[in-house]
Image (cartoon, helix red, strand yellow):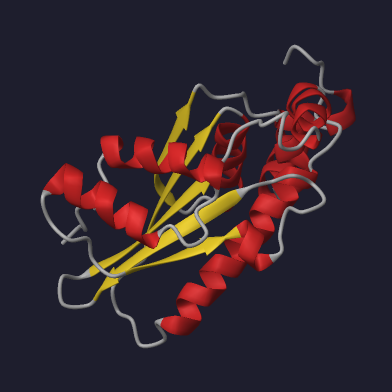
Amino acid sequence: MEQKEILDNSIRNKIVQLEYSDLTNKEEKIRKIYKEETGKEPPEFKIYTSEEMGIGKTSGMDGAAIHFYDKGQKINQVYYIFRGTEPSKDFGDVIYDALGIGAGKKDNQLRDASIMYDKVEKKIKTQNKNNDIKLVRYGDGHSLGSSLIVSIGLIKKTFTNIRGLNDAPVNIKQIVRNDTSFRTYLSRTEGRIDKIPEKK
């Protein structure tokens, strides 16, 4: 039986907005949002933030993951959330928008988002060793965060659902550098990657 999505779009939108003030120690706020929207208490959950993990300090990447787990209700879901551009907080976001998303020359935030994803996945697997409930992954991001979550989704190929709000586009050059299977596919179908016309 397929797990029913715990967080509907309205709850996910509110949590994406909350990520702008960082989700560290925001368990009570998330519980309140969930209860206001559903009239029920949420299943047990744990929040992982890039800040607590020490990821993104140099690049400016800011993200979080909320893992819901309830063996009795057969719930095992993780929601990845990435913050958008915040020039007043980190001018590196503006540079990344131009050189990363625009030109495809930088991918430090994408690399940090990928590192965060891998660490969260490892933590979830370690904490739920005897888990026979399939982990279902969802992703959300706003603006720059949307580009990050969609890119991670394309690279990892594990998400059930990804939503981009007011999204910045994915840069194909970043995907080519960070996804070996896609790079191999392009080489096989197009020949030398550096010779593929920009328009194509």
> Extreme bottom residue here?
130
The furthest residue to the top: 199
Residue at point 47%, 54% (across, down)? 158
Q: Residue at x 80, y 32 (%)?
A: 91
Residue 1 or 128: which is nearer the viewer?
A: 128
In the foreground, 20 or 161: 20
Please state, as top left, top right, bottom left or bottom right, where the C terminus lies in the image. Answer: top right
**Considering only vertical position in the picture, is 22 above or below 119?**
above
Q: Residue at x 82, y 32 (%)?
A: 191
Query: Taking 108 as reference, is 134 left or right?
Result: left
Q: Position of residue 38 (x, y in %)?
A: 14, 47
Using the rendered image of the protein, determine whether residue 161 is visible from the camera's viewpoint. yes
Q: Is residue 141 above or below residue 156?
A: above
The location of residue 103, given as percent across then percent down, is 82, 23
From this view, report whether residue 31 is shown above or below residue 9: below
Residue 156: give x, y in percent of width and height.
57, 52
Q: The N terminus appears in which quarter of the rendering?
A: bottom left
Residue 188 showing in the rendered view:
no
Q: Decide if residue 43 is on the left or right side of residue 13.
A: left
Residue 125 percent across, percent down from the top left: 47, 77
